[in-house]
Image (cartoon, rainbow, N blue to C red):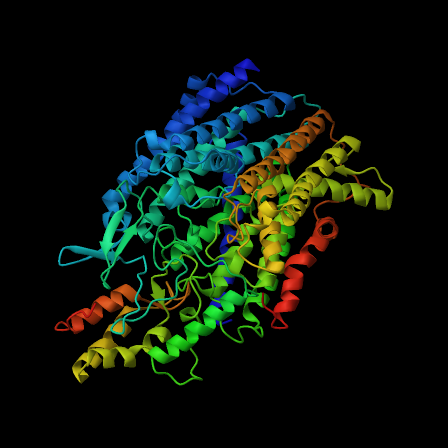
Amino acid sequence: MTTLDFIQIIMYFALLIGLTPVLGNYMSRVFSGQKHFMSPVFGWLEKLIYKFSGINPDEETNWKTYTFSLLAFNAIGLLFVFLLQVSQSYLPLNPAQLPNVSWHSAINTAISFATNTNWQGYSGETTMSYLVQMMGLTVQNFVSAATGIAVLLALIKGLSRRSSATIGNFWTDLTRSTIYVLLPMAILFSIVLVGQGVIQNFHSYQTVHTLQGTEQVLPMGPAASQIAIKQIGTNGGGYFNANSAHPFENPTPFSNFLEMLTILLIPAALTYTYGKMVGSVRQGWTIFSVMLILLLTGLAISLYGEYSGNPVFGQLHLMEGKETRFGITNSVLWSTTTTAASNGSVISMHDSLSPLAGMVAMINIMLGEVIFGGVGAGLYGMIIFVILTVFIAGLMVGRSPEYLGKKVEAFEVQMSIIAVLAPSLVILLFTAWAAVSPYGLSSLNNQGPHGFSEILYAYSSAAGNNGSAFAGLNANTVFYNLTLGIGMLIGRFGIIIPVLAIAGNMARKNITPSSSGTFRTDNGLFSGLLIAVILIVGGLTFFPALSLGPIVEHLLLNHGITF
Amino acid sequence: MKTQIKIALKIFILFTVLLGGIYPLVITGVAQLVFPEKANGSLIAVDNKVVGSKLIGQKFNSDIYFSSRPSATDYNPLPSGGSNLGLTSEKLKQQVDERKLQFVKVNQLDENEPIPSEMLFASASGLDPHISPDAAIIQVGRIENARNFNSTQKQQLFQAINRLTEEPQFLFLGEARINVLQLNLELDKIDVNHIRNN
């Protein structure tokens, strides 16, 4: 590694830390209904949406109605994206005359985009019409992210209110997140991206005559508007198959830096918003620091894996599946952040990463997507772990556990356990199934332990709603499209519903004022305990599976063994 | 519950129009107005004929051009992608060995001369438009021979490489690189009388 490599990494984290309170503060104003600088710009739009849809913004609901609204809205979106895909050949804006998408791929993609996973079994440029990309996928990029934020807001209300029967209004949370946070950022960012060379047009695919006298067909389309929101909303579904490695999607190191920054920006800033809204900025920073420590640890291991030589390729720079303009350091910084956040966009092919870097990517996802995680989703997932930590610490010192003055009781712990177990079960059971069945194994691109890693990564990615892949696995089959689809649904709603149940139950409780006997949740000791709980839960669940995949592959690579 | 479903339908229609229609159309409008060339794919035309995009790599394996990187899709953009081979893949190892032999042979290098690794490994997109400046310089001798360059032309090529080398953006972002298509267009300009042999 050179000095420049370190400077890029330092600049990245300096900006991320610096922007966290700025954006975090703005979002806390937006979400608590105060006046802010965007109200004059889009205030009319918010009112229009409420009026047209028949929403009373002052009306609040209990957690069950909140959950029902959320599920109804997501179900409608899912169905619409499915229908668009299976009828695209009859619809306009399809200059490449792409045929209708197969039913199983369309189901998978519809679930994938509605759950903020953005796993892609298809290749964008040869599968989806401009209309599907815009009206279907771009819309879901926004609203699935806004759904994640809404769940977080409900949980915040549950934690910060006293004896309340309601946890807010799903429609106002959804609307405000979309038009005051996601939309302005996406508008600004997509124009900057076009300035760097990302395409944005409605031309048909262009045929060019190359210098060596052959023809090359260049895909076109409204890419920038979708790429902006796929980064900001931790979606990660590429406009093109190569995702952000594609030069039309990420043409320069500067576009790359910004796309990488926006992966973590909202998830990081939400920790500050959280602190503000529960009445203690320190609580937010404590969670932020836990996330940052876990992220940096993973980054260090990944860089070590990529830069230390191995007997198979000697001291060659491991540029397989990487782009010249980004190099190794940026590729690894990206692979670490995109899996820590549940973004899942890529600039290097994760399948070709060194076993250690590939393992870190997997672990980031397996730990529950709580290292910054998806917008909203990462933080509510982390609070699940906070609840478990408070509970375990309470058991150790013999005090009744409480968090932010709210008693943590059996119901909260039960719900937390469901939220932790649901995605873990998906990963382990489906991986086991695929690894022993002919229809699972026939999709592999690599042999030996790396082949197993391809399967393990796929189900981790689905259950963690990440969406990145060891993309050699041919997942566009009936078996994978359906099992991964089920995995994504369980990984998403198997956490959202317990979280909203906790929010509802917590809201009903009173807040006990803190005293000298209160177990503090905003200091270094608590951070350490929280990290320990996350790692122990993750380790106990996934260490055996990891040792069959990346761990043994790392050892074999160091002995020069290939398959 | 019925009210909630009604609201869900209405707000979904509204969001689809706003985020799936108006938003991308407005961005397209602004993009076409402010950055028309970039928004349309940074296409390069020579004598009114589009020869490619500045951003999308092309396959170059002729003696008279700078070679581009290996590509898992052979520079076919439909669809883009990498090899997705892991480091313990025997296939990848063999590919790298073959590419090494080929590169040494074509460029008449010493067997022990280090080859820039991006020339041995396939890119992520299959469309990488760049190689490192080192990878360009190592090919210069072969191209000058193939094209019978005189000393003025050699000087011009040297200058072209310097001019087209892109340093890390804003001095610290990304890697130094050179655009292969642009470099090869320069080659043809320097060598106006050369009759294409393919």
Residue A254 coordinates in the image, percent (x, y): 39, 57
Which is more toward the observer, A124 or A532? A124
Query: Residue placed at 21% from the left, 80% from the top?
Result: B155
Residue farthest to the top? B2
Residue A404 in view of the camera: no
Residue farthest to the front? A438
Q: Is residue A414 above or below residue B6?
A: below
Q: Is residue A9 above or below residue A274?
A: below
A92 left or right of A238?
A: left
Which is more toward the observer, A331 or A380? A331
Query: Residue placed at 40% from the left, 70% from the top?
Result: B119
Residue A543 coordinates in the image, percent (x, y): 71, 54
Quadrant of the drawing holding the N terminus of chain B: top right
Residue A130 in view of the camera: yes
Name the image quarter holding residue A410: top right
Quadrant of the drawing holding the C terminus of chain B: bottom left
Which is more toward the observer, A349 or A480? A480
Residue A242 coordinates in the image, percent (x, y): 42, 52
Q: Is residue A45 above or below residue A240?
A: above
Which is more toward the observer, B54 or B80? B80
Query: Residue placed at 21% from the left, 69% from the top?
Result: B186
Q: Is residue A295 above or below residue A92?
A: below
Q: How many numbered callouts? A: 0
A124 left or right of A33?
A: left
Residue A528 coordinates in the image, percent (x, y): 72, 53
